[in-house]
Image: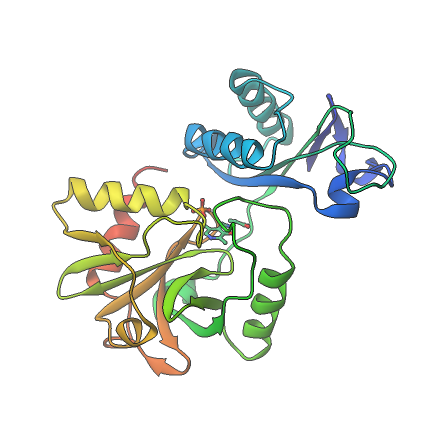
Amino acid sequence: NIGFFNGEFIDINKAVIPIDERGHQFGDGVYEVVKTYHSVPLLLDEHLERFEKSATAIHIRLPYKKAELKSIIVEGIERAGLENAEVYFQVTRGIAPRNHLFPDVPPSFTLTVKPARKIAERNYESGVQTIIVEDDRWAKCHIKSLNLLPNILAKQNAVNSGNFEAIYEKDGFIAEGTSSNVFVVKNAVLYTTPLTSNILPGITREAILQIAKEEGIESKEERFTKDFLMNADEAFISSTSVEVLPIRTVDGQIIGSGNPGEMTKKLHQLFKGLC
Ligand code: PDD
C-alpha cells in the first residue's frame, strides 16, 4: 500500500495528516478513483481531465501539470507492485488554520495505491438489489467533491436493508447511484441520464456510450422515471469499481427476466476488452 502526500512517497500506515488540512476539516477538495488492469491505469487521461475540471470548479489550481500527475501515478503503481490496484487521489485547498475563507497556501495533493476491492462474482451472475431514494445532495453533483456524507448515508441504508446500491431520484427522474451511473435497456435501446449538474459525468458511463456507438447500439441520453426503470428489459449500474453491474431488483421488484440481460452482458464483455 503506497501513499503520496505533498511531494513525497510515504508509507500509508505512517502518514500523518496535519490537523489543519482542509480536506480533513472541511472536505474542501475533489478526488478521483482509477483502477489498474495488468498494472495499467484504465482511462487515466479521462480521469485526469475530470480531476482538473472538478478542481477548477471549486477554484483550486492543481499543484502539478497533467504529465507530472501521470508520472506520480505511474510511479505509485510501480512502487505498489500491484497488477489490479485502486488508485485514489485528491487535491484540497491546503493546510491552514481553520477559517471558511480561502487561505493563501499551496493545495495538498494526496494519492494512495491499494489492491482493488473485489466485487463478488455472484453479483454479476445474479444482478444486484437496489432501492430508490430521494436525492438529498447538493446542486453541483457534476463536481467530484470530497463531501460524500449524503452518499455514505444512502449507501449504508441500502446495504443495511439487503441492497447493493441506492439510486437517487430527483424531481421525479432517476439521477444516478450513490457511487455509480444508471443505464436502462428498453426495446434494444440503451438509455442513461443526460449530463447535467445533477450527476457525475462517469468515465465508465462515457466509455459504455462509446462502445454502444461503435457496436451500432442505439443509445439515448434522456431523463427517465422510476417507473421506466422498473419496467425496463434490462438495467445496470456503471462505475470504475463495478464496471458494468446488472440490476436484479429495484425496490424489491424484479427487472426484466430477473437475470442479467444480453445487452448488459455484451456491454460488460466489450468494456473488459478495454482493460
Ligand atoms: N464513484 N456517480 C457517482 C456519484 C460516483 O461517485 C461515481 C464513481 C460514479 C461513476 O463514475 P466513474 O465511472 O467515473 O467511476 C457516478 C467512485 C468509483 C467512488 O467514489 O469510489
Q: Quadrant of residue 272?
A: top left
Identify the residue shown where x is 47% and y is 46%. Answer: 142
The N terminus: image quadrant: top right
In percent of width and height, residue 18 lies at: 86, 37
Pick the front one: 115 or 180: 180
Q: Tell me the quarter of the picture where residue 275 sits.
A: top left
Colour approach in the figure: rainbow
The residue positioned 33% from the left and 56% from the top of the image is 193
* Left or right: residue 85 compared with residue 3: left
Query: Residue 213 in the image: x percent, y percent?
Result: 18, 43
Query: Which residue is depicted at the point 56% across and 17% down?
Result: 65
Position of 123 relative to 22 (above/below): below
Q: Is residue 39 in sight in this rendering?
A: no
Q: Residue at x 13, y 66 (%)?
A: 187
- Answer above or below: position of 256 versus 214: below
In the picture shown, does residue 15 fall above or below 79?
Answer: below
Q: Is residue 62 visible?
A: yes
